[in-house]
Structure formats: structure tokens, C-alpha cells
Image (cartoon, helix red, strand yellow):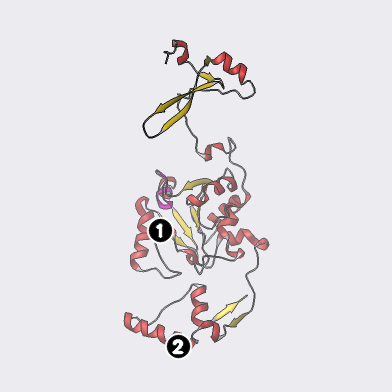
């Protein structure tokens, strides 16, 4: 074969004419096409003008921005009447707090809650199933996990700070409160909704001494105090008449052929477990557990 001229090192096009080289051996023959004529780019564009091929050098680096930077550019937070209304309650007699925590759960720690208990969704506008809102006198932040980052970015207005839980450098609720509140702040919470706060597992109205100490210690680094607002939920106060009514569907006893065991048998088994555990009583607050134990069902 003839050597190629130096200009053939540039991008080439190949014509349709070709010859065949044949390799012979004692057992078989093999033939394949070899293109004869090599032409430079000008001829390539002439012969294939309808479908040009462009080769581009992409040596420059590629950078990406987080989706949060694509939110509308606002110099001032949007007015939020719900935040304004709830902050007005901070200084009321019997309240006197500097921050308020709004978790997602209802009083029973239900996974799926009725609309009337969706307080965090109401105050923040974020409707994802997981999240915790924290409101101070001049800031509001919402923590949620990676499933809901994009949704929260769309639903939160500019008065809210989105805290992407689990991301490097994102503070916990207690760390953030310690940073933004002046020493000696009072942090309010409805004691019906203590579960999941600061990632500490507690039960409705029932804090073990260890859990209570751990919860208080999380915000005591700046001498903050956890304040239980009994019989008063600040979100309910501002929700007023627009708050949906609680569910009122009738409850009936589940037929034994569906329940499997009668209530007496279930209670007897539970009492045996209590004896084995060295306990004298158990408090059951989750609705699905109550329904199973008492064979209750509603539709």
C-alpha cells in the first residue's frame, strides 16, 4: 500500500469506491473491503452536505450549580402572613418564647395523618410527608430529607430557609437554634408532637429521664430552655376556621374471621408479655396499634 500524504491526518471522508484484498491459506480465504480514495474535509462536505459531521474539542471544564441556585432571585423575603401571625403569639402571656418547633406528626405519631393535623404543611406550604419546621422571631427554616429537596425548593417561599438534612455542613435543628438564638432563649413545642425532634425517640407526654436530659442538653449549650405549651398549639390558633374538621367516620368491631383473634385473647397475650418484662402497665398511643388490639376498623 502507498503511504498517505501528511494532509490525510486531518479529518477525512471516504468515497464509496473500494477494492478487495484477499488472504489465501490452505484452508480458507477471507476478503474484506478497503476504501481506495481518501479525500480531505472540503470534498467530504461537498459529497455529504445534507448530513455534515462536526467534531468539537470539549477541553474546557464543566461546572454544575445546585438546583437551589435556580430559584427566583429575590432581594427581600416575601411577606408571609402565617409567619407574622404566629410570631405575634410568641410574646403572649403564657407563651413567651423565642422559637417554635412544628414537626410533621400528629399526637399519635401516625405515618398518615388527617388534614386537620397537617400543621407543618399549613405553616410552611411544604406538603412532603417528612420534615420539621422551626420558626424564630426573624427566621424560619425547614428540614427535610433528599426525597423532597426539589419539592421543597418549589413550595417554600423566600421567607423560608431549606435545610437539606444529611448534606455536608447542614446543621441539625438544635445546632441551628444554638447559632441563631441569643443565649437564654426559650424554645416552644407542643408536647403532643415530641417524637423525632432532634432525632431523639420519645413518646407522647412520656419522656424517660434519659431522653428528656438528652433533649434538653441539645439546646442547653447556649443556655436555651425547652418550653412545653400544654393545651395550646400555635399553628391551630392561627389556622382558625379554615382548619379542616377531624375525621368523624363511624368505628365498628372487626369481624373475627378477619381479625383472627378476639380482643380477650390479645389482651391476655399482652399482659403475659408485661409480666415477662417486669412491667405493670403499657400506654398504647399509635392508632393502628389501638385498632389492632381492640379489633376496631373504620372505612
> Residue 247 at x, y = what percent?
63, 71
**Residue under numbered circle 1:** 199
**Which residue is painted at 50% across and 78% down in the image?**
292
Figure check: 289 above or below 75: below
Any part of residue 138 in sight: no
Helix, strand or loop under label 1:
helix
List x then y, in percent, for residue 244.
65, 64
Task: Left or right? Give the position of 88 relative to 187.
Answer: right
Looking at marks 1 and 2 on the same chain, the residue that comes earlier in the sequence is marked by 1
Q: Is residue 289 magenta?
A: no
**Crowdedness near tag 2: few (<14), some (14–19) or many (≥20) residues, C-alpha within 10 Å:** few
Q: Quadrant of the N terminus?
A: top left
Q: Indicate which label's residue lies in the foreground, 1 or 2.
A: 2
Q: Horizontally, is 186 left or right of 127 in the view?
A: left
* Residue that appears at 55% across and 22% down: 54
Residue behind mark 2? 265
Taking the image as shown, residue 234 lies to the left or right of residue 8, namely right
Q: Position of residue 241 (x, y in %)?
A: 68, 63
Q: Quadrant of the C terminus?
A: bottom right
Q: Which residues are magenta?
A: 169-176
The answer to whether any part of residue 298 appears in the image is yes
> What is the distance, in whole Å, between disc 1 and disc 2 at their CAs?
36 Å
Q: Position of residue 87 (x, y in %)?
A: 56, 52
The relative height of residue 49 versus residue 76 in the rendered view (above or below) is: above
Where residue 190 is drawn, which disc sits there? none
Image quadrant of residue 23? top left
Residue that protrudes farthest toward the front in the picture: 26
State which quadrant residue 114 falls in: bottom right
Amino acid at each position: 500500500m502507498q503511504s498517505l500524504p501528511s494532509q490525510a491526518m486531518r479529518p477525512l471522508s471516504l468515497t464509496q469506491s473500494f477494492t478487495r484484498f484477499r488472504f489465501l491459506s490452505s484452508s480458507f480465504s477471507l476478503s474484506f473491503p478497503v476504501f481506495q480514495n481518501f479525500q480531505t474535509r472540503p470534498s467530504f462536505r461537498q459529497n455529504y452536505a445534507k448530513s455534515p459531521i462536526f467534531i468539537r474539542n470539549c477541553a474546557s471544564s464543566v461546572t454544575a450549580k445546585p438546583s437551589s441556585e435556580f430559584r427566583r432571585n429575590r432581594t427581600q423575603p416575601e411577606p408571609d402572613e402565617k409567619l407574622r401571625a404566629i410570631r405575634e403569639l410568641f410574646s403572649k402571656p403564657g407563651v413567651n418564647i423565642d422559637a417554635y418547633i412544628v414537626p410533621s406528626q400528629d399526637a399519635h405519631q401516625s405515618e398518615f395523618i388527617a388534614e386537620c393535623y397537617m400543621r407543618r404543611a399549613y405553616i410552611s406550604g411544604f406538603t412532603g410527608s417528612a420534615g420539621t419546621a422551626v420558626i424564630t422571631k426573624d427566621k424560619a427554616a425547614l428540614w427535610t430529607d433528599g426525597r423532597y429537596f426539589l419539592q421543597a425548593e418549589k413550595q417554600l417561599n423566600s421567607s423560608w430557609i431549606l435545610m437539606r438534612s444529611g448534606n455536608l455542613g447542614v446543621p441539625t435543628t438544635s445546632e441551628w437554634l444554638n447559632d441563631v438564638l441569643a443565649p437564654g432563649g426559650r424554645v416552644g413545642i407542643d408536647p403532643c408532637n415530641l417524637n423525632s425532634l432532634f432525632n431523639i425517640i420519645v413518646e407522647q407526654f412520656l419522656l424517660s429521664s434519659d431522653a428528656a436530659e438528652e433533649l434538653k442538653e441539645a439546646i442547653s449549650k447556649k443556655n436555651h430552655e425547652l418550653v412545653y405549651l400544654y393545651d395550646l398549639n400555635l399553628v391551630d390558633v392561627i389556622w382558625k376556621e379554615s382548619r379542616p374538621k377531624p375525621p368523624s367516620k363511624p368505628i365498628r368491631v372487626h369481624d373475627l374471621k378477619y381479625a383472627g383473634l378476639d380482643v380477650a385473647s390479645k389482651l391476655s397475650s399482652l399482659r403475659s408479655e408485661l409480666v415477662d418484662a417486669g412491667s405493670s402497665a403499657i400506654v398504647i398511643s399509635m392508632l393502628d396499634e389501638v385498632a389492632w388490639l381492640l379489633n376496631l376498623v373504620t372505612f
